[in-house]
Image: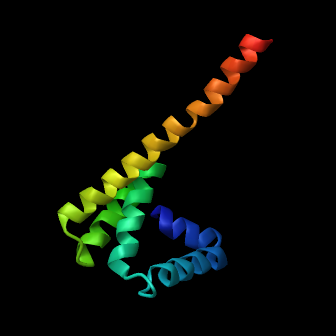
Amino acid sequence: MSARERRAALSPAQDKAFREFSRAVFADGALSRKTKELIAVAVAHVTQCPYCIRGHTKSAKRHGATSEEILEAIWVASEMRAGAAVAHSALAFEALDEAEDG
């Protein structure tokens, strides 16, 4: 039995609700399905979920994203993750100041 089947068997209401939520989130709206999938590819790389990376990369391609667009989304994710590390240097500077004052 697959993990998806086990989840559905053990908690059918929650599994159904999550699948319906996912369908609603990825439906065309103010953003196209393609754009949402590119966002999901980027987020999957930041959260480092291998299942999400595979699934959303394939789905982005199915919904018209080019390989170049997918890689560009990955580069955006990389910059955001690296940018967060640089921004958090402010905490290190505060700790240094506290250590020097203390």
Residue 25 versus residue 90 in the image, above or below: below
Q: Nearer the viewer, residue 39 or 21?
A: 39
Q: Which residue occupies 23% across, 77% down? A: 64
Residue at horizontal 72%, vertical 11%?
A: 100
Answer with the quarter of the image where residue 61 lies: bottom left
The residue sitting at the left extreme is 67
| Place of residue 33 in the rendered image (x, y in percent of width and height, measured from the top left) | 37, 80
Q: Which quadrant is home to the C terminus?
A: top right
Horizontally, residue 13 falls left or right of residue 63, namely right
Q: Residue furthest bottom?
A: 29
Q: Position of residue 52 (x, y in %)?
A: 41, 60
> Is 80 placed above or below 54 here?
above
> Above or below — where is 57 with respect to 92?
below
- Left or right of 52 in this view: 88: right
Give the quarter of the image for residue 7. bottom right
What x and y, as percent, mark residue 48? 44, 48
Q: Residue at x 63, y 25 (%)?
A: 93
Q: Residue at x 19, y 68 (%)?
A: 66
